[in-house]
Amino acid sequence: MKTKPTSQRLESLDALRGFDMFFIMGGAALLASLAQWFPGPFTEALAQQMDHAEWNGLLHHDTIFPLFLFIAGISFPFSLDKQRRQGKREGAIHWKVVRRGLTLFVLGLLYNGLLDHLNFAHIRIPSVLARIGLAWMFAALIFMHTRWQWRAAITAVILVGYWLVARFIPAPDAAGADIFSAQGSIVGYLDRVLLPGHIYTPTYDPEGILSTLPAIATALLGMFAGEWVKSDGRSLTPRKKVLGMVAAGIVLLGLGLLWSLVFPINKKLWTSSFVLVVGAYSVLMFALFYWLIDVRGWRRWAKCFTVIGMNSITIYLGQRFINFGYTSKKLFGGLVGLLPEASQPFFTNAAYIAVCWLFLYVLYRKRLFLKV
């Protein structure tokens, strides 16, 4: 488990991953609690963004998961090139890709409580980690065996094919239901039929079987961004790389919004329009972080996020198995209790984040990074 970051590592990528995970590490609750401390239109709108859309639509919290998958995609072209330069055989690289995907799938089962009662009959099989692992794995295998033109075609086929299947094949057990609803969608139907008793709700799973296909496209979009930034043509300056990503973000956003007119933006179904719109957000955020950190060299402000980003899987799993809330209460509960009541939720969340961050900082200082 002990390793050191390589000199070729994009600092902006670690910082962006940390920024993304900050919201999972309590940042969303911290910002939402501002509405209790300072009620008003702005803070209430901000608090609304810190939750998922009920069904169709897009809120900031809906971007966290796909951005993480997009970032995983960005890093692969660099990782693949490094392994090939080290002389690793293609078979070994393939096995490493597959092993990572399967490891994340198993970690997802553990996250869902596999060892709680050792009762596989009722455990939820899909998970966030499983989706990251499987979508990234298939995207990585595609990346290894195709040129960019074929990858672009495959991405388009996945997104268009998924739309056509979702649009024209209704759930056989829900006649008359909205075809893009949880009950009426073929996406939910396959989860009910193939994974009965193992899904998040009785009707569908937001990380279910069929919706993993467009998630592969999300990872591929990240790989396009990574390959673009990795390009070393003489005329392709860092400034042009940033501008290229901004242009790509604008195009993806426009296409996604147009597509949403016939295929709603929906994270739970991971619709094709959702892939494009959140892909736009992801590439624009990466362009911003890349410009500020790797191009301009403004790194100090991002250190707090880098500490999180270097151990993102650690904190995701750690919050499941370590009671950081208990520790933060024991350390800061008395002090928080002395504060005005309206401000206490904010500082309670801030204390929780501080304990999590200090835990990660110790690992960072010791150069201990969980790698899957």
Image (spheres, rainbow, N blue to C red):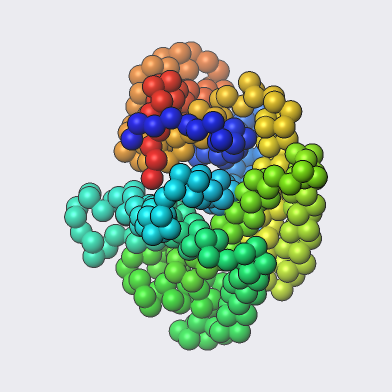
Instruction: Answer left or right for 280 relative to 76.
Output: right
Near-viewer residue (213 or 190): 213
Q: In percent of the image, x 52 and y 25: which residue is there?
A: 350
Q: In percent of the image, x 19 and y 52: which residue is there?
A: 117
Instruction: Answer left or right for 372 relative to 140.
Output: left
Residue 344 visible in this rendered orientation of the protein? no
The quadrant of the picture occupied by the C terminus is top left
Total numbered labels: 0
Question: Looking at the rendering, which quadrant does residue 193 occupy?
Answer: bottom left
Question: Looking at the rendering, which quadrant does residue 234 occupy?
Answer: top right
Residue 368: percent from the left, percent from the top? 38, 28
Q: In percent of the image, x 52 and y 60: which residue is there?
A: 144
Residue 300: percent from the left, percent from the top? 63, 21
Residue 70: percent from the left, percent from the top? 58, 51
The quadrant of the picture occupied by the N terminus is top left
Instruction: Answer left or right for 100 relative to 11.
Output: left
